[in-house]
Image (cartoon, rainbow, N blue to C red):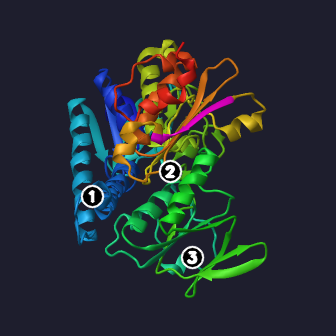
Amino acid sequence: MITYDVAIIGGGPAGYTAAERAGAAGLSTVLFEKNALGGVCLNEGCIPAKTLLYSAKVFDTVKHASNYGVGAENACADLPKIMARKNKVVKKLTAGVRMRMKECHVTTVEGMAVIKGRASDGTIALACAGESYEARRLVICTGSETFIPPIPGLDGSGYWTSREALQAKETPKSLVIIGGGVIGMEFASFFNSLGTNVYVVEALGEILTGMDKELASLLRAEYTRKGVTFYLAHNVTAVNETGVWVEKDGETFALPGEKVLLSAGRRPVTQGFGLETLAVDLFRGGIKVNEWMQTSLPNVYACGDVTGYSLLAHTAVGEAEAAARHIVGGKASAGMSYKAIPGVVYTNPELAGAGATEEQLQAEGRAYSVKKIPASFSGRFVAENERGAGVCKIILSEDETVIGVHLLGNPSSELIVIAGVAIEKGFKARELASFVFPHPTVGEILKEALGGFWK
């Protein structure tokens, strides 16, 4: 039996990043994955979903090509071909992850790893596929799973989660989406583009909780214009052959849908792999960690969705890098910072944000100011987004430090990293405004919003 320097359970973004960094640093590393390398994100989440959304975006562009002086009649969306392209993209990227593991001399083991316990010297014992393993350090990256609420009749309804939606064989004529979060809105965008009648049911008063409320409202208005119907502050009470039953203020009615997509959130996976043998501290349903991603046991780390803190793939990568830095370099290494984690909704138009929202600052009683302008102040945006909606909102603290940026409009997902750097590094408004942005670019909107800080 080989004793590894590092063992990692879970081959998603957190797991394969930790494995790559540890292996590249010369540590003997073993990575266990029960399904497929890349985890949920690469195989049935981020990457396949964004591949489908790009196909939908291309279709949207073709349908409205006349707005740009281009003729493109009889456009159609071929769902089987769209799905085939998605599968090709996933296959290519998973092969890339396998190659990276090989290049970094990481041992990969297919199967469900189970923790057997921790010896007096701290060594962790594990078992997988009938073999035994030991490791001096353990990194738990077991991810999250779809939360299934106890809705009467849901189990027998043949509902979709994101997994089934990503494998759809046909475009449904109508779709009821339970949950107006990021996943729900992205699938609303995709199926709306393909011609499905989409209904979104959200228990709260606005979609996209945690994002800037004003911009979320504008995005909802845009999709209402496109034909999506929203039922805010409505609770789902049952699912049966007559449809999805919803209730608000005592009024109950059914929404007929050919398919039902459940998008009510995700929760950390902390069961089924022997975590209880280590008795680590838990917090809010996930594993409690410090800034270096250590659990209550110093040689046991947890990264990614299993911590229950920020269920985003890029957060998982950052956490894995923080853990790897600590494993290699000790406490002198930089810990994980959550100051400017970008959040992105890959709808069309995109919505993105980093740092504080107005709602958060108001709840905390913190003073702030807002610089906000339409994206139409960018010539490039106007040229590429005929009749497109867009807003740039920059939030400043009392001393004019950039503490939040929120963007609506394409390509917000690519621009938000600029904002994230500014927030993380504590830029003043005048410092961000002093940079020379290339012209014409949509990114200039950030500089335009801070036009009064040029001096």
Which kind of residue does numbered mark 2 sit on? Ser
SS label for mark 2: strand
Say the numbered circle drawn on residue 86.
1
Q: CA distance from mark 1 to mark 2?
A: 22 Å
Total of numbered circles in the picture? 3
Q: As drawn, is 129 to the left or to the right of 396?
A: left
Q: Position of residue 132 (x, y in %)?
A: 36, 42
**In this picture, which residue range is highlighted in magenta?**
369-376
Q: Quadrant of residue 154?
A: bottom right
Q: Are marks 2 and 3 in contact (CB under 8 Å)?
A: no
Q: Position of residue 327 (x, y in %)?
A: 44, 22
Rendered-image quadrant of the N terminus: top left
Residue 140 seen in the current view: no
Q: As drawn, is 54 to the left or to the right of 236?
A: left
Say the numbered circle drawn on residue 154.
3
**Foreground: 288 or 432?**
432
Residue positioned 48% across, 50% down in the render: 389
Q: Position of residue 155 (x, y in %)?
A: 54, 76
SS label for mark 1: helix
* Label 3 environment density (alpha carbons within 10 Å; few <14, some 14–19, many ≥20): some
Q: As drawn, is 262 to the left or to the right of 435?
A: right
Q: Quadrant of residue 355?
A: top right
Magenta span: predominant SS is strand
* Image depth: mark 3 or mark 1 in front: 1
